[in-house]
Amino acid sequence: MPCGGLLLRLGHTPVMARSGEEALQMLETQPVDMIIMDVEMPCLNGFETTRLIREWLAGHWIPIIFVTGLADDENYREGIEAGGDDYLIKPVSYMIIKAKIRAMERIAEMRDQLNRLNNELEALSQLDSLTQILNRRSFNEFAQQQWAQTKRHQQPISALMIDVDHFKLYNDHYGHPAGDACLKKVTQAIKSCLHRTNDLLGRYGGEEFVVLLPETDTQGAYCVAQAINKAICDLNIPHTTSMTGTHVTASIGGATCIRTTSHSLDELVKYADRALYKAKRSGRNRALVDEVAIHKTILLADKDQKNIQHFSDLLAQHFTILTCESGKECFELSLDVSPDLILMSEDIMLMDDKMLCQELAQNPKTSGIPVTIFSETPCLEHPAIKANLGIKACFDKTQNAPTLLNNILQVIH
């Protein structure tokens, strides 16, 4: 009985091709689960046709069984090298073809199972184990793809940095299992506010989340951020040790890039980080969204509020100003925000009995940030300059605005 009849008896639906060329054309439009190939065919023989099928389908494997009247070793070798998986010798036996097909089915089932497991493993490697959203590495990879697409189409794009307020206090008071449960609920609250398939959500680390919003301007990003604030508040998770409220809240910093040509994704995230810092400083449980601009950021570090106010007044028109009042806070902010310049007072230079400038110079994340000090001591005579502690410049407290601006621009550029 011909193979087609045997296949019908076995409950399969055969599709017939009368030549190798016809088989190749058929495969372009019709998916098949197995190929039973006669070796002796006009024009393209079975071996040549198989080589072309394997080359064309590349990684997609379909079982191919040769049917031939030639049973010599050389034919077996050539068939296997061409990409065949098994042989049937004419005349074909019903029991033999049944067994061969079942064997190929088992192999195909194992292939499909392996593919499913590989896909699951790949998906798991992209996800944060606790929250089941993108981990930081995967978020950055997908975000770069979105950034490139946004850049091609010259569309606005926004990023949000979300930080659960006083989460360390929550963990210390309620315990880590409760902290994990809290982060899962916060994740779901954030997800409920993201309605487009190309919006990206990732866990950036600890209690910090990041959102990328393609095709979103400043107003759109602010609306999403406000919705997230409300969704987290609506969870009504008690937080009795919070210094912001009685329930779990979050601070959100956002940034929008209107013209992506002259900027990068890293800059966008950095600006969102800076906005997050400002949201925290202005009371937490709120959202602030800035537009990525040409202004560079200066971190002012001084224990004296009068000095901070003085330099802020002189520089605010030309720079984005962040402030802090201790060496520890200066170091932490430098790690998180990566300002373009650190301007610190002499009394801030000591941090836990270590020179703050040395700590900044030794950390890979902060070593590239220019560090300057303001002092009443003449610059060339200052001990930090003379000791080569990584201080780029020393500014006189009494400098007027044009002189100070010019000196700072020389350091930054």
Image (cartoon, rainbow, N blue to C red):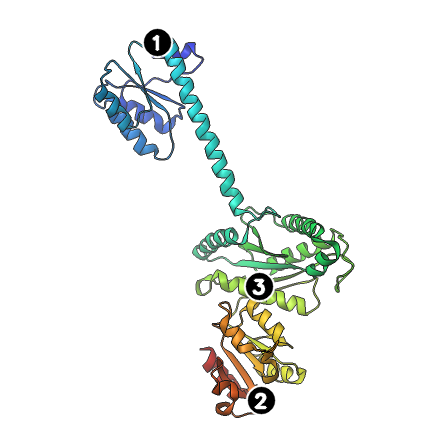
Q: Which residue is mark 3?
A: 272
Q: Which residue is mark 2?
A: 397
Residue 124 seen in this snapshot: yes
The residue located at (42%, 25%) in the rendering is 107
Q: Quadrant of the N terminus?
A: top left
**The residue under label 3 is which amino acid type?**
Ala
Q: Position of residue 320 (x, y in %)?
A: 57, 74
Q: Position of residue 278 (x, y in %)?
A: 64, 69
Q: In terms of sequence position, does the residue under pointer 1 or pointer 2 come before the other? A: 1
Res 241 quadrant in image: bottom right
**The residue under label 1 is which amino acid type?**
Ser
Distance from Cα at disc 3 to Cα at disc 2 = 31 Å
Distance from Cα at disc 1 to Cα at disc 2 = 99 Å
The disc placed on residue 93 is 1
The residue located at (52%, 47%) in the rendering is 126
The front one of 210 and 333 is 333
The residue located at (72%, 50%) in the rendering is 178
> Left or right: 323 with respect to 110?
right
Q: Position of residue 267 (x, y in %)?
A: 50, 64
> Left or right: 258 with respect to 77?
right
Residue density around tag 3, few if under 14, some if 14–19, many if 20 or more, within 10 Å = many
Res 68 quadrant in image: top left
Give the label, 1 or 2, closer to the camera. 1
The disc placed on residue 331 is none
Residue lying farthest front?
353
The front one of 136 and 230 is 136
Contact? badges 3 and 2 (CB < 8 Å): no
The residue located at (58%, 72%) in the rendering is 331
Q: In terms of sequence position, does the residue under pointer 1 or pointer 3 come before the other? A: 1
Local SS, label 1: loop
Q: In terms of sequence position, does the residue under pointer 3 or pointer 2 come before the other? A: 3
**The residue under label 2 is which amino acid type?**
Lys
